[in-house]
Amino acid sequence: MKIENPVLPGFNADPSMIRVGDTYYIANSTFEWWPGVRLHESKDMVHWRLLPSPLNRRSQIDMRGNPSSGGVWAPDLSYADGKFWLVYSDVKIVNGAFKDCTNYLVTAEDIRGPWSEPIRINGVGFDASLFHDDDGRKYLVQQTWDFREYNHPFDGITLTEFDVETMRLRPETERTIWRGTDVKLVEGPHLYKINGMYYLFCAEGGTVWTHQEVVARSSTLDAMSFEGSPYDPFISNFDTPRSYLQKQGHGALVDTPSGEWYYASLCARPWHHENESVTDPRGWCTLGRETSIQKVEWTDDGWPVVVGGHGGQRVVEAPQDAIETEAPADHSQHDDFEASQLALDWNTLRVPFDESMGSVGGGTLTLRGQGSLCNLFDLSLVARRWQAFDFDASVGVRFDPTNYRQMAGLTNYYNDLCWSWAFVTWDEKRQCRVIEVAQNDFNSYTSFLRDRAVPVPDDVETVWLRTRVRTQTYGYDYSFDGEQWHDLGVELDAKILSDDYVNQRYGGFFTGAFVGLAAVDLSGYAATAEFVDFDYRELSE
């Protein structure tokens, strides 16, 4: 059996992988997307099943108004004392000198929940993880943020003892245990005790092409006691620009029941336009940061190294003791909206799906028009990840707008700055419904069809919209019967929905592209749109 990377395609960043018995679990960052923290489980590291998210109540996290790529950063999943522990950050500022964040802890006896109400831990820095020592003591390990302009903002790795009786940190025990290498930007720490030594895994170089993971170790947890590995970087693609996987770094180590070792890392897969160099720019990652798994071996002098070299491999040997399970060949999805709750693949922005957004069930997803797709507070958008470079997605829309401020349709969305959509709206000149295509490119808004917007016949109840994504470009189609499709004549550059494009002008570039359904009513009358028979169909590579 083989592990084919990435094992979690599409936006599944910052993996925290653990094993409990014969089952492996991965927790991933979700940033501003709701619900918070994405969980998967597997028996073989090859096939992964999506689980309910642990942060599914407003009382656990309040992200309304959070900036794009704020919210839940680098959750840490662990298991000790008969229960699961989950540490996560809520980051409120993305750009500038400050990274205001609060770190929280929730626990559960069952990975599927219910998860507890959160305990506020601290705000020293993001990427916090909880280390359970074999003597029963616990420690919070975290990146440390320094906002002062005369220091480097990544101020080393801080360790603080956690009191299990009070479920609070002991601030007086805080100390810096390592400052990383000269690559800087040390973050994403995970601490392990193996054969009597403490091993500290950290990401460096920023979550871009220079990203890497390094390892340090110490016989104690004293201040500044850790020394870096002579084999660093542990994993990196900075010097392997032609590798299928790029940006590998931030992640977590796990052992198998039979004593093998593996490392789950974030990664990305760039593509290029035909007229671009394959090394500069290195490419555009529209699927965001994904999860890969690499096999690990140990040197004679006790250091971990990635099998096959620090660039990693696309195909990796699965654990010898793996229990093979079945899983779908791809992530295609058809939703007839018969269920009274949204399927696990669906996400909303910052807040849960509730009556202020709409309702679902009985064959229809109903969305109440709220703010524009630039809105950070009140937005009716239900979306799912792009998980393949090539796919078709379609939906039927029933919508009767009375003015041009009312819109409903199908969107390809990265964040509030970069998105596009095909939508039904009202043309006051022709006094009829029309289909328009528009794009928001760093708040440069373009309506492509204008006077050529397609009129919707009065007797058409359902307008069908489809997007065709083909790696480098994508477009939109329409149909009045769900069978005969017509190209809307707009071809868009997919790079605008990539981490790397957003990174050129904005400090939060951590998610990935989504395809979704949205209703907008800027007139404030909450005009409702009905969506039926959503279909997301991945095409074979």
Image (spheres, rainbow, N blue to C red):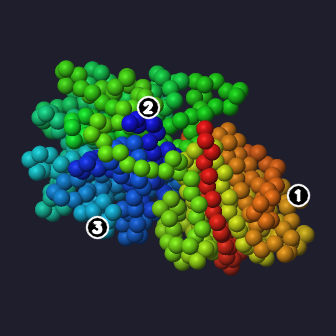
**Looking at the rendered structure, which numbered label has been put on residue 116?**
3
Measuring from the top left, give residue 516's x and y in whole percent: 61, 59
User: Please, what is the three-letter code of the amino acid marked with disc 1?
Assistant: Arg
User: Please, what is the three-letter code of the amino acid marked with disc 3?
Assistant: Ser
Q: Quadrant of residue 220?
A: top left
Q: Residue at x 38, y 54 (%)?
A: 39
Q: Quick check: 237 left or right of 477?
A: left
- How many angstroms separate mark 2 from mark 3 (CA)? 38 Å
Q: Residue at x 19, y 61 (%)?
A: 167
Residue that numbered label 2 is attached to: 315
Which label's residue is closer to the chain start, 1 or 2?
Answer: 2
Tell me the quarter of the image containing the C terminus. top right
SS class, disc 2: strand
Residue that numbered label 1 is attached to: 452
Tags 1 and 2 touching, CB below 8 Å: no
Which label's residue is closer to the chain start, 3 or 1?
Answer: 3
- How many angstroms separate mark 1 from mark 2 (CA)? 49 Å
Number of residues whose C-alpha sits closer than 10 Å to that of mark 1, classed few (under 14), some (14–19) or many (20 or more) = few
Q: Residue at x 62, y 52 (%)?
A: 537
Number of residues whose C-alpha sits closer than 10 Å to that of mark 2, classed few (under 14), some (14–19) or many (20 or more) = some
User: Please, what is the three-letter code of the amino acid marked with disc 2?
Assistant: Val
**Looking at the rendered structure, which numbered label has been put on residue 345?**
none
SS class, disc 3: loop
Tags 2 and 3 touching, CB below 8 Å: no
